[in-house]
Image (cartoon, coloured by chain):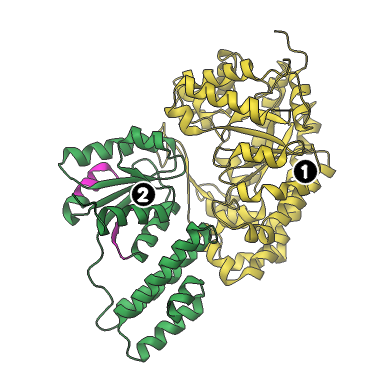
Amino acid sequence: MMDEMTPRERIEAAIRCEKPDRVPMVPMMDFFCARQKGVTLEKFINDNDLGRELMLQIFDGYGGWDALFQSTTLNEFAFALTLPMRLKVPGRELPEDAVWQFEEIPVLDIEDYDVAVAQGYQALCARIFPRIRPHWQPQQFPELLNQWLGQAVKDTLICEARGLHSFTGVAISPPFDFFSMGRSLKEFTFDLYRRPEKVLAAMDAITPGLIETAIGGQMGMRQATQYGYMTNFIGATREAATFISPKVFEKYAWPFIKRIALALLDAGITPLFHFDSNWGPMLEFFKDLPKGKCVLELDGATDIFKAKAVLAGHMCLMGDVPASLLTLGTPEDVCNYVRKLCEVVGDGGGYILSTGCDTPVDAKPENVRAMLDAGREHGSYRH
Amino acid sequence: MATQLATAMADLDESKVQELVQAGLAQGLSPAALLDDCRSGMTLIGQRFESGEYFLSDLIMAGEIFKTAAATLAATAGGASGPGKGRVVLGTVKGDIHDIGKDIVVTMLRGAGYEVEDLGVDVPLAKFVERVQATGAQVVGLSGLLTISFDPMKETVAALKAAGLATKVMIGGGPITESVRAYVGADALGRDAQEAVALCNGWITAPEVA
Protein backbone atom coordinates (compact mmCIF):
# COMPACT_ATOMS: atom_id res chain seq x y z
CA MET A 1 0.00 0.00 0.00
CA MET A 2 1.34 3.43 -0.90
CA ASP A 3 1.95 5.89 1.91
CA GLU A 4 0.00 9.11 1.67
CA MET A 5 2.18 11.11 4.00
CA THR A 6 5.91 11.64 4.34
CA PRO A 7 7.50 10.39 7.57
CA ARG A 8 7.79 13.98 8.79
CA GLU A 9 4.13 14.73 8.08
CA ARG A 10 3.11 11.47 9.73
CA ILE A 11 5.09 12.12 12.92
CA GLU A 12 4.00 15.75 13.11
CA ALA A 13 0.34 14.79 12.72
CA ALA A 14 0.70 12.29 15.57
CA ILE A 15 2.30 14.97 17.77
CA ARG A 16 -0.67 17.27 17.05
CA CYS A 17 -2.86 14.36 18.27
CA GLU A 18 -4.28 14.01 14.79
CA LYS A 19 -4.73 10.86 12.76
CA PRO A 20 -1.98 10.35 10.16
CA ASP A 21 -2.28 7.79 7.34
CA ARG A 22 -0.79 5.19 9.70
CA VAL A 23 0.85 4.99 13.11
CA PRO A 24 4.41 6.32 12.77
CA MET A 25 7.18 4.04 14.04
CA VAL A 26 10.29 5.37 15.79
CA PRO A 27 11.93 2.57 17.77
CA MET A 28 14.95 3.41 19.91
CA MET A 29 17.68 1.12 18.74
CA ASP A 30 21.44 1.34 19.21
CA PHE A 31 23.37 -1.44 21.01
CA PHE A 32 21.07 -3.99 19.40
CA CYS A 33 22.45 -2.90 15.99
CA ALA A 34 26.02 -3.57 17.08
CA ARG A 35 25.19 -6.99 18.50
CA GLN A 36 23.32 -7.99 15.34
CA LYS A 37 26.26 -6.94 13.18
CA GLY A 38 28.82 -8.73 15.35
CA VAL A 39 30.53 -5.52 16.49
CA THR A 40 31.53 -5.16 20.14
CA LEU A 41 29.87 -2.45 22.18
CA GLU A 42 33.31 -1.03 22.93
CA LYS A 43 33.86 -0.38 19.21
CA PHE A 44 30.30 0.84 18.76
CA ILE A 45 30.50 3.58 21.39
CA ASN A 46 34.01 4.70 20.50
CA ASP A 47 33.52 5.02 16.75
CA ASN A 48 30.49 7.18 15.99
CA ASP A 49 30.80 6.83 12.21
CA LEU A 50 30.76 3.07 12.53
CA GLY A 51 27.86 3.31 14.99
CA ARG A 52 25.77 5.40 12.60
CA GLU A 53 26.48 3.04 9.69
CA LEU A 54 25.45 0.00 11.75
CA MET A 55 22.21 1.73 12.77
CA LEU A 56 21.52 2.52 9.11
CA GLN A 57 22.29 -1.06 8.06
CA ILE A 58 19.80 -2.40 10.60
CA PHE A 59 17.28 0.24 9.53
CA ASP A 60 17.55 -0.96 5.92
CA GLY A 61 17.72 -4.64 6.87
CA TYR A 62 14.45 -4.44 8.80
CA GLY A 63 12.55 -2.56 6.11
CA GLY A 64 12.94 0.88 7.68
CA TRP A 65 10.62 3.01 9.79
CA ASP A 66 9.76 6.69 10.10
CA ALA A 67 12.78 8.33 11.73
CA LEU A 68 15.95 7.26 13.48
CA PHE A 69 15.39 7.77 17.20
CA GLN A 70 18.83 9.36 17.28
CA SER A 71 21.33 9.49 14.43
CA THR A 72 24.43 9.82 16.59
CA THR A 73 25.37 6.93 18.82
CA LEU A 74 25.78 8.00 22.42
CA ASN A 75 29.21 7.94 23.98
CA GLU A 76 30.83 8.60 27.29
CA PHE A 77 31.12 12.30 26.59
CA ALA A 78 27.50 12.71 25.54
CA PHE A 79 26.31 11.14 28.78
CA ALA A 80 28.54 13.53 30.74
CA LEU A 81 26.55 16.43 29.26
CA THR A 82 23.25 15.17 30.61
CA LEU A 83 23.73 12.69 33.43
CA PRO A 84 25.92 13.69 36.37
CA MET A 85 27.06 10.16 37.15
CA ARG A 86 30.13 8.01 36.82
CA LEU A 87 29.87 5.45 34.10
CA LYS A 88 31.38 2.00 33.68
CA VAL A 89 32.10 1.49 29.99
CA PRO A 90 32.74 -1.61 27.88
CA GLY A 91 36.41 -2.19 27.22
CA ARG A 92 37.55 -0.28 30.28
CA GLU A 93 35.77 -1.17 33.52
CA LEU A 94 33.61 -3.79 31.81
CA PRO A 95 34.17 -6.57 29.25
CA GLU A 96 34.36 -5.27 25.67
CA ASP A 97 30.86 -6.41 24.77
CA ALA A 98 29.04 -5.47 27.98
CA VAL A 99 26.34 -2.79 28.27
CA TRP A 100 27.52 0.32 30.09
CA GLN A 101 26.19 0.93 33.56
CA PHE A 102 25.95 3.99 35.78
CA GLU A 103 27.38 4.06 39.26
CA GLU A 104 24.97 5.15 41.97
CA ILE A 105 27.47 7.05 44.08
CA PRO A 106 27.34 10.72 45.16
CA VAL A 107 29.37 13.10 42.98
CA LEU A 108 27.69 16.18 44.50
CA ASP A 109 28.01 17.30 48.12
CA ILE A 110 25.44 19.12 50.19
CA GLU A 111 27.47 22.32 49.62
CA ASP A 112 26.92 21.95 45.87
CA TYR A 113 23.31 23.00 46.36
CA ASP A 114 24.69 26.35 47.50
CA VAL A 115 27.03 26.47 44.51
CA ALA A 116 24.04 25.92 42.23
CA VAL A 117 22.16 28.78 43.87
CA ALA A 118 25.12 31.15 43.78
CA GLN A 119 26.56 30.29 40.38
CA GLY A 120 23.98 28.42 38.32
CA TYR A 121 23.93 25.35 36.10
CA GLN A 122 27.04 25.81 33.96
CA ALA A 123 29.29 26.44 36.97
CA LEU A 124 27.87 23.36 38.65
CA CYS A 125 28.54 21.27 35.54
CA ALA A 126 32.14 22.51 35.46
CA ARG A 127 32.57 21.20 39.00
CA ILE A 128 30.93 17.90 38.19
CA PHE A 129 32.86 17.06 35.00
CA PRO A 130 36.21 16.10 36.63
CA ARG A 131 34.34 14.13 39.30
CA ILE A 132 32.43 11.95 36.84
CA ARG A 133 35.16 11.64 34.20
CA PRO A 134 38.36 11.65 36.26
CA HIS A 135 40.37 10.20 33.35
CA TRP A 136 39.82 13.39 31.31
CA GLN A 137 41.37 16.77 31.97
CA PRO A 138 38.87 19.60 32.48
CA GLN A 139 40.69 21.65 29.83
CA GLN A 140 39.85 18.94 27.28
CA PHE A 141 36.17 19.79 27.66
CA PRO A 142 35.84 22.46 24.90
CA GLU A 143 37.60 20.21 22.39
CA LEU A 144 35.46 17.19 23.33
CA LEU A 145 32.34 19.31 23.07
CA ASN A 146 33.29 20.56 19.61
CA GLN A 147 34.02 17.03 18.45
CA TRP A 148 30.66 15.86 19.73
CA LEU A 149 28.72 18.72 18.14
CA GLY A 150 30.58 18.22 14.85
CA GLN A 151 29.69 14.53 14.92
CA ALA A 152 26.03 15.30 15.62
CA VAL A 153 25.79 17.72 12.69
CA LYS A 154 27.59 15.28 10.39
CA ASP A 155 25.33 12.35 11.33
CA THR A 156 22.18 14.44 10.95
CA LEU A 157 23.27 15.65 7.51
CA ILE A 158 24.19 12.15 6.32
CA CYS A 159 20.80 10.85 7.41
CA GLU A 160 18.89 13.82 6.00
CA ALA A 161 20.69 13.30 2.67
CA ARG A 162 18.96 9.96 2.42
CA GLY A 163 15.64 11.43 3.57
CA LEU A 164 15.90 10.11 7.08
CA HIS A 165 15.10 12.40 10.01
CA SER A 166 16.62 12.31 13.47
CA PHE A 167 13.76 12.15 15.94
CA THR A 168 15.70 13.52 18.86
CA GLY A 169 19.17 14.62 19.93
CA VAL A 170 19.77 17.42 22.39
CA ALA A 171 19.01 16.04 25.83
CA ILE A 172 18.58 17.34 29.34
CA SER A 173 17.56 15.94 32.71
CA PRO A 174 15.04 17.94 34.73
CA PRO A 175 16.41 19.36 38.02
CA PHE A 176 14.90 16.61 40.21
CA ASP A 177 16.57 13.86 38.19
CA PHE A 178 19.74 15.88 37.86
CA PHE A 179 20.27 16.25 41.60
CA SER A 180 19.05 12.74 42.34
CA MET A 181 21.70 11.33 40.00
CA GLY A 182 24.39 13.68 41.29
CA ARG A 183 23.67 13.07 44.96
CA SER A 184 22.68 9.39 44.45
CA LEU A 185 19.09 8.32 44.93
CA LYS A 186 19.57 7.56 48.61
CA GLU A 187 21.31 10.78 49.61
CA PHE A 188 18.91 12.85 47.55
CA THR A 189 15.96 11.18 49.24
CA PHE A 190 17.46 12.02 52.63
CA ASP A 191 17.99 15.61 51.41
CA LEU A 192 14.30 15.88 50.53
CA TYR A 193 13.45 15.00 54.13
CA ARG A 194 16.25 16.85 55.88
CA ARG A 195 16.81 20.02 53.83
CA PRO A 196 13.90 20.41 51.41
CA GLU A 197 14.21 24.19 51.05
CA LYS A 198 17.86 23.97 50.03
CA VAL A 199 17.02 21.36 47.40
CA LEU A 200 14.15 23.42 46.06
CA ALA A 201 16.29 26.56 45.80
CA ALA A 202 19.02 24.69 43.93
CA MET A 203 16.53 23.12 41.50
CA ASP A 204 15.08 26.54 40.84
CA ALA A 205 18.57 27.96 40.27
CA ILE A 206 19.67 25.45 37.62
CA THR A 207 16.46 25.57 35.58
CA PRO A 208 17.39 28.61 33.47
CA GLY A 209 20.73 26.99 32.58
CA LEU A 210 19.04 23.74 31.61
CA ILE A 211 16.62 25.64 29.38
CA GLU A 212 19.44 27.61 27.81
CA THR A 213 21.38 24.39 27.13
CA ALA A 214 18.35 22.70 25.60
CA ILE A 215 17.34 25.60 23.38
CA GLY A 216 20.89 26.59 22.48
CA GLY A 217 21.74 23.04 21.47
CA GLN A 218 18.62 22.64 19.41
CA MET A 219 18.98 25.99 17.67
CA GLY A 220 22.63 25.19 16.95
CA MET A 221 21.49 22.01 15.22
CA ARG A 222 18.87 23.88 13.22
CA GLN A 223 21.42 26.39 12.06
CA ALA A 224 23.91 23.71 11.15
CA THR A 225 21.47 21.47 9.30
CA GLN A 226 18.31 22.09 7.37
CA TYR A 227 16.02 20.48 9.92
CA GLY A 228 17.80 19.66 13.15
CA TYR A 229 16.06 17.26 15.46
CA MET A 230 12.30 16.81 15.51
CA THR A 231 12.13 16.89 19.31
CA ASN A 232 14.24 17.75 22.31
CA PHE A 233 14.83 14.89 24.71
CA ILE A 234 13.87 15.40 28.37
CA GLY A 235 14.75 12.21 30.22
CA ALA A 236 13.36 11.41 33.65
CA THR A 237 12.90 8.40 35.89
CA ARG A 238 13.48 9.39 39.48
CA GLU A 239 10.46 11.63 39.80
CA ALA A 240 8.09 8.84 38.71
CA ALA A 241 5.60 7.20 41.07
CA THR A 242 7.98 4.24 41.20
CA PHE A 243 9.96 6.46 43.56
CA ILE A 244 7.94 9.39 44.88
CA SER A 245 4.37 10.34 45.73
CA PRO A 246 2.27 12.63 43.51
CA LYS A 247 2.40 15.11 46.41
CA VAL A 248 6.20 15.26 46.34
CA PHE A 249 6.06 15.35 42.55
CA GLU A 250 3.72 18.31 42.57
CA LYS A 251 6.00 20.37 44.78
CA TYR A 252 9.52 19.28 43.81
CA ALA A 253 9.36 18.03 40.24
CA TRP A 254 6.43 19.14 38.13
CA PRO A 255 6.93 22.94 38.38
CA PHE A 256 10.36 22.57 36.80
CA ILE A 257 9.31 20.11 34.11
CA LYS A 258 6.49 22.43 33.18
CA ARG A 259 8.71 25.50 33.12
CA ILE A 260 11.25 23.76 30.88
CA ALA A 261 8.55 22.43 28.53
CA LEU A 262 6.87 25.82 28.16
CA ALA A 263 10.22 27.49 27.46
CA LEU A 264 11.00 24.92 24.74
CA LEU A 265 7.56 25.39 23.21
CA ASP A 266 8.08 29.15 23.19
CA ALA A 267 11.26 28.53 21.22
CA GLY A 268 9.36 26.36 18.74
CA ILE A 269 10.81 23.09 20.01
CA THR A 270 8.77 19.95 20.70
CA PRO A 271 9.51 18.45 24.13
CA LEU A 272 9.90 14.68 24.13
CA PHE A 273 9.29 13.39 27.65
CA HIS A 274 11.31 10.18 27.68
CA PHE A 275 9.85 9.11 31.01
CA ASP A 276 10.84 5.67 32.26
CA SER A 277 9.27 3.89 35.25
CA ASN A 278 5.66 4.27 36.42
CA TRP A 279 4.03 7.67 35.83
CA GLY A 280 0.46 6.44 36.27
CA PRO A 281 -0.47 8.63 39.26
CA MET A 282 1.19 11.65 37.61
CA LEU A 283 -0.60 11.54 34.25
CA GLU A 284 -3.16 14.22 35.12
CA PHE A 285 -0.37 16.78 35.51
CA PHE A 286 0.45 16.59 31.81
CA LYS A 287 -2.91 18.18 31.03
CA ASP A 288 -1.37 21.44 32.29
CA LEU A 289 0.65 21.62 29.08
CA PRO A 290 -0.77 22.86 25.79
CA LYS A 291 -2.67 20.38 23.66
CA GLY A 292 -0.95 18.59 20.78
CA LYS A 293 2.50 20.03 21.40
CA CYS A 294 4.51 17.44 23.35
CA VAL A 295 5.28 13.72 23.25
CA LEU A 296 5.13 11.45 26.30
CA GLU A 297 7.27 8.36 25.75
CA LEU A 298 6.70 5.47 28.17
CA ASP A 299 8.77 2.35 28.79
CA GLY A 300 6.24 -0.32 29.72
CA ALA A 301 6.26 0.42 33.46
CA THR A 302 3.44 2.96 33.08
CA ASP A 303 0.12 1.53 31.94
CA ILE A 304 0.10 3.16 28.49
CA PHE A 305 -3.55 2.20 27.98
CA LYS A 306 -4.48 4.15 31.10
CA ALA A 307 -2.29 6.99 29.84
CA LYS A 308 -4.34 6.99 26.66
CA ALA A 309 -7.57 7.20 28.63
CA VAL A 310 -6.25 10.21 30.55
CA LEU A 311 -4.43 12.05 27.77
CA ALA A 312 -6.32 11.14 24.57
CA GLY A 313 -6.56 14.15 22.30
CA HIS A 314 -4.24 16.10 24.56
CA MET A 315 -0.77 14.62 24.34
CA CYS A 316 0.86 12.29 21.84
CA LEU A 317 1.93 9.00 23.44
CA MET A 318 4.92 6.96 22.36
CA GLY A 319 6.06 3.46 23.31
CA ASP A 320 6.09 0.97 24.78
CA VAL A 321 6.97 -2.57 23.61
CA PRO A 322 8.57 -3.83 26.85
CA ALA A 323 12.20 -4.91 26.99
CA SER A 324 11.38 -8.30 28.49
CA LEU A 325 8.85 -8.99 25.71
CA LEU A 326 11.48 -8.28 23.04
CA THR A 327 14.00 -10.47 24.85
CA LEU A 328 11.94 -13.41 26.09
CA GLY A 329 8.64 -13.23 24.20
CA THR A 330 7.72 -14.91 20.94
CA PRO A 331 7.03 -13.05 17.68
CA GLU A 332 3.36 -13.87 18.22
CA ASP A 333 3.39 -12.27 21.71
CA VAL A 334 5.04 -9.18 20.25
CA CYS A 335 2.59 -9.00 17.37
CA ASN A 336 -0.41 -9.28 19.70
CA TYR A 337 0.91 -6.56 21.94
CA VAL A 338 1.71 -4.19 19.06
CA ARG A 339 -1.73 -4.80 17.59
CA LYS A 340 -3.31 -3.81 20.92
CA LEU A 341 -1.09 -0.71 21.07
CA CYS A 342 -2.16 0.35 17.58
CA GLU A 343 -5.83 -0.34 18.23
CA VAL A 344 -6.13 1.18 21.70
CA VAL A 345 -3.35 3.75 22.10
CA GLY A 346 -3.43 4.54 18.38
CA ASP A 347 -7.19 5.05 18.39
CA GLY A 348 -7.99 8.45 16.90
CA GLY A 349 -4.31 9.29 16.34
CA GLY A 350 -1.78 10.87 18.69
CA TYR A 351 0.42 7.80 18.92
CA ILE A 352 3.95 6.85 17.85
CA LEU A 353 4.88 3.16 18.03
CA SER A 354 8.20 2.59 19.75
CA THR A 355 10.14 0.31 22.03
CA GLY A 356 9.76 0.76 25.80
CA CYS A 357 12.95 2.79 26.27
CA ASP A 358 15.75 1.15 24.27
CA THR A 359 15.66 -2.06 22.25
CA PRO A 360 17.57 -4.43 24.54
CA VAL A 361 20.96 -5.49 23.23
CA ASP A 362 19.86 -9.11 23.55
CA ALA A 363 16.42 -8.69 21.95
CA LYS A 364 15.55 -11.53 19.59
CA PRO A 365 15.85 -10.25 16.02
CA GLU A 366 12.64 -12.09 15.06
CA ASN A 367 10.83 -10.15 17.80
CA VAL A 368 12.14 -6.81 16.55
CA ARG A 369 10.99 -7.77 13.06
CA ALA A 370 7.61 -8.84 14.43
CA MET A 371 7.22 -5.46 16.17
CA LEU A 372 7.86 -3.55 12.94
CA ASP A 373 5.76 -5.86 10.76
CA ALA A 374 2.86 -5.65 13.19
CA GLY A 375 3.18 -1.87 13.30
CA ARG A 376 2.91 -1.71 9.50
CA GLU A 377 0.05 -4.18 9.41
CA HIS A 378 -2.10 -2.92 12.28
CA GLY A 379 -1.10 0.75 12.29
CA SER A 380 -3.09 1.82 9.24
CA TYR A 381 -5.85 4.39 9.79
CA ARG A 382 -7.38 3.71 6.37
CA HIS A 383 -10.07 1.26 7.26
CA MET B 1 -1.74 0.00 70.07
CA ALA B 2 1.47 1.33 68.61
CA THR B 3 3.97 2.83 71.03
CA GLN B 4 5.17 6.39 70.58
CA LEU B 5 8.41 5.03 69.13
CA ALA B 6 6.60 2.80 66.64
CA THR B 7 4.43 5.74 65.61
CA ALA B 8 7.42 8.07 65.16
CA MET B 9 9.11 5.38 63.08
CA ALA B 10 5.99 4.88 60.97
CA ASP B 11 5.68 8.64 60.46
CA LEU B 12 9.34 8.81 59.37
CA ASP B 13 10.08 11.37 62.06
CA GLU B 14 13.84 10.95 62.19
CA SER B 15 14.69 13.23 65.11
CA LYS B 16 11.82 11.94 67.24
CA VAL B 17 12.88 8.31 66.71
CA GLN B 18 16.41 9.15 67.83
CA GLU B 19 15.07 11.06 70.81
CA LEU B 20 12.73 8.26 71.90
CA VAL B 21 15.42 5.59 71.50
CA GLN B 22 17.77 7.61 73.73
CA ALA B 23 15.00 8.34 76.23
CA GLY B 24 13.99 4.68 76.32
CA LEU B 25 17.54 3.57 77.02
CA ALA B 26 17.88 6.24 79.72
CA GLN B 27 14.72 4.90 81.35
CA GLY B 28 16.28 1.46 81.40
CA LEU B 29 14.09 -0.15 78.75
CA SER B 30 15.73 -3.11 77.10
CA PRO B 31 17.31 -2.52 73.67
CA ALA B 32 15.47 -5.59 72.39
CA ALA B 33 12.10 -4.11 73.35
CA LEU B 34 12.96 -0.79 71.71
CA LEU B 35 14.06 -2.59 68.56
CA ASP B 36 10.75 -4.43 68.55
CA ASP B 37 8.99 -1.05 68.63
CA CYS B 38 11.04 0.11 65.65
CA ARG B 39 10.10 -3.08 63.84
CA SER B 40 6.44 -2.50 64.60
CA GLY B 41 6.92 0.91 62.99
CA MET B 42 8.49 -0.76 59.95
CA THR B 43 5.50 -3.08 59.70
CA LEU B 44 3.19 -0.05 59.63
CA ILE B 45 5.42 1.50 56.97
CA GLY B 46 5.09 -1.65 54.90
CA GLN B 47 1.32 -1.46 55.23
CA ARG B 48 1.26 2.19 54.22
CA PHE B 49 3.40 1.31 51.19
CA GLU B 50 1.02 -1.47 50.25
CA SER B 51 -1.99 0.81 50.56
CA GLY B 52 -0.40 3.41 48.30
CA GLU B 53 0.12 6.03 50.99
CA TYR B 54 3.89 5.60 51.02
CA PHE B 55 6.23 5.43 48.04
CA LEU B 56 9.73 4.08 47.48
CA SER B 57 11.37 7.30 48.69
CA ASP B 58 9.57 6.81 52.01
CA LEU B 59 10.95 3.27 52.26
CA ILE B 60 14.45 4.59 51.59
CA MET B 61 14.05 7.11 54.41
CA ALA B 62 12.54 4.45 56.66
CA GLY B 63 15.58 2.26 56.04
CA GLU B 64 17.90 5.08 57.04
CA ILE B 65 16.03 5.86 60.27
CA PHE B 66 15.74 2.18 61.17
CA LYS B 67 19.41 1.50 60.45
CA THR B 68 20.54 4.33 62.72
CA ALA B 69 18.19 3.29 65.52
CA ALA B 70 19.23 -0.37 65.24
CA ALA B 71 22.93 0.60 65.32
CA THR B 72 22.41 2.71 68.45
CA LEU B 73 20.58 -0.16 70.15
CA ALA B 74 23.13 -2.77 69.07
CA ALA B 75 25.95 -0.60 70.46
CA THR B 76 24.25 -0.48 73.85
CA ALA B 77 25.43 -2.93 76.49
CA GLY B 78 23.63 -6.20 76.01
CA GLY B 79 22.83 -5.34 72.41
CA ALA B 80 19.52 -5.75 70.68
CA SER B 81 20.19 -8.78 68.58
CA GLY B 82 18.26 -11.90 69.26
CA PRO B 83 17.78 -14.81 66.92
CA GLY B 84 16.28 -13.59 63.65
CA LYS B 85 13.09 -14.91 62.12
CA GLY B 86 15.11 -16.59 59.42
CA ARG B 87 18.11 -16.19 57.14
CA VAL B 88 18.13 -14.63 53.70
CA VAL B 89 21.00 -14.19 51.27
CA LEU B 90 20.52 -11.42 48.72
CA GLY B 91 22.47 -9.88 45.86
CA THR B 92 22.41 -8.36 42.38
CA VAL B 93 23.51 -11.01 39.91
CA LYS B 94 26.67 -11.16 37.81
CA GLY B 95 26.96 -8.48 35.14
CA ASP B 96 24.59 -6.02 36.83
CA ILE B 97 25.65 -3.32 39.30
CA HIS B 98 22.26 -1.85 40.21
CA ASP B 99 21.65 -1.78 43.95
CA ILE B 100 18.78 0.58 44.76
CA GLY B 101 16.01 -2.01 44.68
CA LYS B 102 18.13 -4.65 46.34
CA ASP B 103 19.11 -2.29 49.18
CA ILE B 104 15.50 -1.48 49.92
CA VAL B 105 14.59 -5.16 50.02
CA VAL B 106 17.50 -5.79 52.40
CA THR B 107 16.33 -3.00 54.72
CA MET B 108 12.70 -4.06 54.73
CA LEU B 109 13.65 -7.69 55.43
CA ARG B 110 15.87 -6.61 58.30
CA GLY B 111 13.09 -4.36 59.55
CA ALA B 112 10.82 -7.39 59.46
CA GLY B 113 13.26 -9.29 61.67
CA TYR B 114 15.20 -11.41 59.20
CA GLU B 115 18.96 -11.91 59.27
CA VAL B 116 20.04 -10.79 55.82
CA GLU B 117 23.42 -11.28 54.23
CA ASP B 118 23.80 -8.68 51.50
CA LEU B 119 26.28 -9.92 48.89
CA GLY B 120 26.31 -6.61 47.01
CA VAL B 121 26.25 -6.26 43.22
CA ASP B 122 27.77 -8.15 40.29
CA VAL B 123 27.73 -11.32 42.39
CA PRO B 124 29.07 -14.50 40.73
CA LEU B 125 26.83 -17.55 41.09
CA ALA B 126 29.47 -19.47 43.05
CA LYS B 127 29.27 -16.79 45.73
CA PHE B 128 25.53 -17.33 46.17
CA VAL B 129 26.05 -21.08 46.48
CA GLU B 130 28.91 -20.65 48.95
CA ARG B 131 27.03 -18.20 51.17
CA VAL B 132 23.85 -20.26 51.23
CA GLN B 133 25.90 -23.30 52.23
CA ALA B 134 27.73 -21.30 54.91
CA THR B 135 24.68 -19.56 56.40
CA GLY B 136 22.00 -22.17 55.86
CA ALA B 137 19.80 -19.43 54.43
CA GLN B 138 16.22 -20.50 53.73
CA VAL B 139 15.72 -17.88 51.03
CA VAL B 140 17.90 -16.43 48.29
CA GLY B 141 16.97 -13.15 46.61
CA LEU B 142 18.34 -12.35 43.16
CA SER B 143 18.09 -8.80 41.87
CA GLY B 144 18.63 -7.33 38.40
CA LEU B 145 17.60 -4.25 36.46
CA LEU B 146 18.86 -5.21 33.01
CA THR B 147 17.59 -7.86 30.63
CA ILE B 148 21.14 -9.24 30.60
CA SER B 149 20.55 -10.30 34.22
CA PHE B 150 18.07 -13.01 33.16
CA ASP B 151 20.69 -15.57 32.17
CA PRO B 152 22.88 -15.12 35.26
CA MET B 153 19.70 -15.50 37.36
CA LYS B 154 18.82 -18.71 35.54
CA GLU B 155 22.36 -20.04 35.98
CA THR B 156 22.36 -19.15 39.67
CA VAL B 157 19.09 -20.97 40.26
CA ALA B 158 20.50 -24.00 38.43
CA ALA B 159 23.72 -23.86 40.47
CA LEU B 160 21.82 -23.76 43.77
CA LYS B 161 19.83 -26.80 42.67
CA ALA B 162 22.93 -28.60 41.44
CA ALA B 163 24.53 -28.03 44.86
CA GLY B 164 21.54 -29.80 46.40
CA LEU B 165 20.32 -26.69 48.24
CA ALA B 166 16.62 -26.65 49.00
CA THR B 167 16.56 -22.89 49.48
CA LYS B 168 13.68 -20.88 48.02
CA VAL B 169 14.61 -18.36 45.35
CA MET B 170 12.84 -15.05 44.81
CA ILE B 171 13.77 -12.59 42.07
CA GLY B 172 13.03 -8.94 41.56
CA GLY B 173 13.96 -5.88 39.53
CA GLY B 174 12.60 -3.47 36.91
CA PRO B 175 12.09 -5.79 33.92
CA ILE B 176 11.15 -8.89 35.94
CA THR B 177 7.81 -10.35 34.92
CA GLU B 178 6.12 -13.70 35.37
CA SER B 179 7.60 -14.93 32.08
CA VAL B 180 11.06 -13.96 33.33
CA ARG B 181 10.41 -15.86 36.58
CA ALA B 182 9.42 -18.93 34.59
CA TYR B 183 12.49 -18.57 32.36
CA VAL B 184 14.81 -18.21 35.33
CA GLY B 185 13.17 -21.04 37.26
CA ALA B 186 12.77 -19.03 40.47
CA ASP B 187 10.13 -19.94 43.05
CA ALA B 188 8.59 -16.50 43.08
CA LEU B 189 8.91 -12.94 41.90
CA GLY B 190 8.59 -9.95 44.20
CA ARG B 191 7.37 -6.77 42.55
CA ASP B 192 8.51 -4.64 45.47
CA ALA B 193 10.17 -4.87 48.89
CA GLN B 194 6.88 -5.47 50.64
CA GLU B 195 6.17 -8.48 48.44
CA ALA B 196 9.65 -9.80 49.23
CA VAL B 197 8.85 -9.61 52.95
CA ALA B 198 5.52 -11.35 52.36
CA LEU B 199 7.25 -14.12 50.39
CA CYS B 200 9.75 -14.73 53.21
CA ASN B 201 6.97 -14.67 55.78
CA GLY B 202 5.13 -17.30 53.76
CA TRP B 203 8.18 -19.52 53.35
CA ILE B 204 9.86 -19.12 56.72
CA THR B 205 7.61 -17.72 59.42
CA ALA B 206 4.41 -19.46 58.39
CA PRO B 207 5.56 -22.43 56.34
CA GLU B 208 2.92 -24.49 54.62
CA VAL B 209 1.64 -27.37 56.67
CA ALA B 210 2.65 -30.58 55.01
Q: Amino acid at mark 1?
A: Ile
Highlighted magenta segment, given as a residue range: B113-130
Question: Vertical placement of A5 versus B123: above or below?
Answer: above
What number is the disc on residue A24? none
Q: Is residue B123 magenta?
A: yes
Residue drawn 48% across the image and 53% down it: A104
Q: In this rendering, would A20 be left or right of B135?
A: right
One can see residue A140 in this view: no
Disc 1 and disc 2: Cα gap in Å?
39 Å
**B44 or B135, which lies in front?**
B44
Residue A302 in which image quadrant: top right
Residue drawn 43% across the image and 76% down it: B6
Q: Is residue A66 magenta?
A: no
Q: Position of residue A81 (x, y in %)?
A: 63, 45
Which corner quadrant holds the N terminus of chain B? bottom left
**A76 or A360, which lies in front?**
A360
- The residue under label 2 is B121
Q: Position of residue A47 (x, y in %)?
A: 54, 28
| The color chain B is rendered in | green
Question: Vertical placement of A209 versus A29: above or below?
Answer: below
**A26 or A307, which lies in front?**
A307
- The residue under label 1 is A215
Pointer 1 chain:
A
| The color chain A is rendered in | yellow
Residue A201 in which image quadrant: bottom right
Residue drawn 75% across the image and 51% down it: A258
